[in-house]
Amino acid sequence: MRRTSVRNPPPSHVPCPPRCIYARRPVLAVRAEQQQQEQEVAASQRSGPTGLNVGKYRPTSPAGWAEMAAALRQANVKVVAPQELPWLKEKGAVLLDIRPVESYGEGHLPGATSVSFYQPIQGWTPWQIARRAGYALFGISQGTEANPNFLSEVRQLVADPESTPVVLYCNLGGSLEPTKNDRNGQQTRSMVAAYELIQGGFKNVSVLKGGYLDWVANDREIEIFE
């Protein structure tokens, strides 16, 4: 078989004029970048309260809560009684109210700092529009979404995530003790927030037993912004 060397082989197809090629490249690049950004946003919104999955499950699913509860136990996350707070504060504990800012302003535990785990829905992505519609079905005009800055805001308040005690509370508190309805305990926003903190490297996390509602029901002192 004879080999033939060709300096300028004939084209196998008719090329697009240069002006067509250069005109399309920026458009295609921009579209690809936009699609990638949209996919990243959609993926983060689907993966749980603040962009976290629990294994392959959503955090609010029964299977997700089971894995979350196991991780909380392994990380030695405690549910502390209100009577333990003075002792924890002496140890330098940071007390965080993770309820909405409005609830914090209406009343909170003395010395607590507000770091909302959820916030009013901010944008108009397809996921956020669907979430707004879901709330509207129940007659709720202002829905909420996860606070994407939760971890960074907590880090600004905690000197050493590996040693500083952090105590969280929402309205209900939460529990890791088996109940009649759930052998893994009671899942609450405090429990989900605690899970996110341990995933973010915090080593000394606790949840207040009974939360804010139990605190008020027992006629304990609160602070109110006027």
Image (cartoon, rainbow, N blue to C red):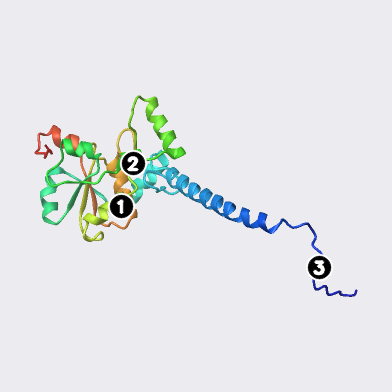
33, 173: nearer the viewer: 33
Query: x, y percentage for residue 52?
Result: 40, 48
In the rendered structure, are the residues bearing label 3 and label 2 in contact, judged by CB atoms less than 8 Å apart?
no
Which quarter of the image is occupied by the C terminus? Answer: top left
Q: Which residue is mark 2?
A: 184
Which quarter of the image is occupied by the N terminus? Answer: bottom right
Give the image quarter of residue 144. Answer: top left
Give the image quarter of residue 117. Answer: top left
Decide: few, some or many residues near mark 3? Use Cα within 10 Å; few <14, some 14-19, many ≥20. Answer: few
2, 61: nearer the viewer: 2
Q: Nearer the viewer, mark 1 or mark 2?
A: 1
Q: Secondary structure at mark 3?
A: loop
* Residue in the picture at 27% in, 57% down: 203
138, 89: nearer the viewer: 138
- Per the model, the C-alpha gap separating discs 1 and 2 is 25 Å
Give the image quarter of residue 109. Answer: top left
